[in-house]
Amino acid sequence: MSLTQSDAQSDPTRTQPGRGSVSGYEAVHISREFRTLRRRFGSFVVPATVLFLSWYFLYVIIAAFAPGFMRLHVLGEVNVGLCFGVLQFVSAFVITVAYRRWARRNLDPLSDRLRQRLEARRRR
Amino acid sequence: MTAQQATQATQVAQATHTLAAATVGTPEVNLLIFAFFIIVTLVIAVRAAGTNRTTTDYYAGGRAFTGPQNGIAIGGDYLSAASFLGIAGLIALYGYDGFLYSIGFLVGWLLVLLLIAGPLRNTGRYTAADVLDFRLKAVPVRAAAAVSTLTVSLFYLLAQMAGAGGLVSLLLGVNGSVGQDITVVIVGLLMIFYVLVGGMKGTTWVQIVKATILTVGAAVTAFWVLARSGFNISALLHHAAASSPAGNAVLGPGLIYGANTVSKFDFISLAIALVLGTAGLPHVLMRLYTVPDAREARRSVIWTVWLVGLFYLFTLVLGYGAMWLVGGKQILAAPGRANAAVPLLAFKLGGTLLLGIVAAVAFATILAVVAGLTITASASFAHDVYAGVLRRGEADPDDEVRVARTTAVVIGAVAVIGGIFAKDIDVAFLVGLAFAVAASANLPSILYSLFWPRFTARGALWSIYGGLISSVVLIIFSPVVSGQVSPAGGAGASLISDPHINFAFFPLDNPGIVSIPLAFFLGWLGTVTDRRTADPARFARIQVRALTGIGAEHGSRG
C-alpha cells in the first residue's frame, strides 16, 4: 500500500534519542506494520459493528412499526417475531465466534510481533 | 397429548386460585438456603482477603483472573435481579415485549467485544476514567468521568436495592415496611463486608459462585417447564397465550409499547439505550481490568456473551412458563408483582425446595451485584476523585485503598437509605434508565478517545456533562417522575403518584433517543470549536498501546 514510506518510518527502533517515549509511539504509529495492524482491526470491527447494529435496529423498527409481520405464523404458534428474536441471539453468537477465530489468526500474531519489537527496543 | 396437557393446565389454573398470594413456600426453608449461601460467600471473601495487599489487589483482583473466570463474573455482575426476575416477569405479564429487553441486553455485548474490551484493558489501570486521562491528560476530564461513573453506579445500585425489599418480603414472609427496611439494612451490611474484606478478588469470586448457581437454576427450571410442555415450544406458547387475558397478543410485540406512536418511539429509545448502554456501564468496564492482558479481556467478553445469551433464552422459557402455569392474575397479586413471577413458577413446579433455591439465587444476585457496584463506585471515588483530582496523581497507594474502603461504607449507607425510599419502583425499568445514562455520559467519550485523532479535553467535557445532564434532566421531566395516570385508575404510575402534579414535558420514559445522539454531537462540537488542537503524540500513544498492548499494566500471569 504505502510504497512511499521510508524504512525509518516503518522501524520504530530508529527514533532519535532524547525525544521522549511519546515520540517513540508516534514513530510506531506511522510505521507500515502498525498501519497494517490498524487497517486489519478496522476491516473486521467496522463492518461487523455496522452489520450487527443495522440488523438489531431493523428488528427493533419492525417490532415497533410492523407488529403484524411479527405475528405471521411460521410453525404452529411459533411466529416470525420469535424466530427473528432468536436469530438475534444466533447472530450474536456467530459474530462472537467469528471474531475470536479471525482475531487469533489475523490480529494477534501481528500485534505480538509489534509489541515484542517495541519491548526489545525499550530494554536496550 | 394436547388434551392431557390442557386438562393439566386447567388443574394448575385452579390450584393457582386457591394458593395464598401473600407469601409462598416455607420461609424457614428459604432462610436456611439464604444462610447457606451467605456463609459460603463470606468464607470466600475472607479467604480472598488474605491476599489483598496493593491497590491492584483491591481494585483489580491482582489482575490474576483468567478470561473464563472473569467472563463468568461479568455475567454475574450483569445478570442482576432485574434480568432474572424482572425480564421473566415482564414476559410472564406482557409476553413478547419483555423479550425485547433481553435482546438489547445481549446485543450490546458485541459493542464491548469489538470496540472496547481489548483497547480499554490495554490503556487503563483500574477505571474507565483512566482511558480518558491517558488520552487527554486533563484533571477536569477525570473528574467528569468520575462524576458520571458515580451517578450511573448509584442509579443502578438504587435499582438493585429497590428490588431487594420486595423480593425478600415475598420469600421470607417479612411483611410490613419495617421488616423490609431491616432486610435492606442487612443486605447493605453484607455487601459492605464483602467489599471491605474481599476487595475485587472476593467480590469476583462471589460473582462467579452466583453466576454459576443462577445459570444452573435458570436452566433446570426452564428444562422443567419445557418438559411439562412435552419439549414443544409451540405447545408452550399455546398454553401461555390460552391462560393470559390478552390471549394471542402476548405472542407478538406491542402489549407494552404498541399503544401509540409515542410509546413506539419510547420503545426505540429504550432499544438504543440498551444496546449502547452495556459498553458504558462502569462496573462492567472495571471488570475488564481483572485479567492479565487484552487477550484475556476479549476472552472474558466471549464467555460473557455465551453465558448471557443462554441465560436470556432460559428466561424466555421461564417467562412464558410462568404465564402458563402461574398466570398473570396471581403474579400481579403477589408482593413484588412482576418480580414474583419466577419464584411463583418455581413453587408451582418444584414446591418448597425449588422455590427456596430460586429465592436464594435471586437474593445472591442482589447481594453480588450490589457488591460489584459498590466496589466500582468506591474505586472511582478513591482512584479518580481522591488520587487523580484531589492529589493530582500523587496519592500514596495505601491512602488510596483506605479512601476506597471508607467510600465503600459511605456508598453502602447511601444505598441502604435510597433502597428504603425507592422500594416500590419497578426494577427492570430503573435499570433501563441507568443504561440510558451510561450510554449518554460514558460511551461517546471512551469511543472518541480511542478512535478519533482530533478529540480534545473540551469535547470530552461537553460530551460527558452534556450526556449526563441531558439524560438525567429528561428523566426528571418525563412521565416516569410525574403526571402519569395509572391505567387501572387511582394513584398515578409515576414516582410522584399524585396525578395532579405534572411537569412531564418530555413524552418518553427513556431519554436515550435524545441524550445519546446529543452526547456524541456535543463531543464532536466541543472538539471542532476548540481553539487548542489535539496532541497527535497522545493519540499515537493510545492507539499503539490499545492495539499492541505495549506498556499496558500487566497482571501476575502476563
Image (cartoon, helix red, strand yellow):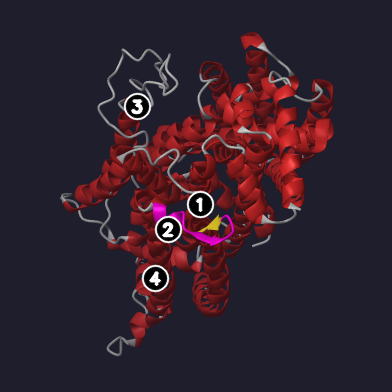
Residue A8 spot, x, y in % from top left: 35, 83
| Discs 2/4, front | 2
Helix, strand or loop under label 1 = helix
Q: Which residue is mark 1?
A: B103
Q: Chain of mark 3?
A: B
Residue B505 spot, x, y in % from top left: 25, 27
Q: Which residue is mark 2?
A: A56
Residue B366 spot, x, y in % from top left: 64, 32
- The numbered disc on residue B79 is none
- The numbered disc on residue A47 is 4
Which amino acid lies under the numbered mark 4 shown in the image of this protein? Pro
Nearer to the camera, A52 or A4: A52
Nearer to the camera, B330 or A2: B330
If you read the primary sequence from the N terminus, does the residue marked by circle 2 or circle 4 appear first?
Answer: 4
Q: Chain of mark 1?
A: B
Helix, strand or loop under label 2 = helix
State how far apart marks 4 and 3 are (Cα).
38 Å
Q: Chain of mark 4?
A: A
State how far apart marks 3 and 2 are (Cα).
27 Å
Are the residues tagged 2 and 1 within 8 Å (C-beta)? yes
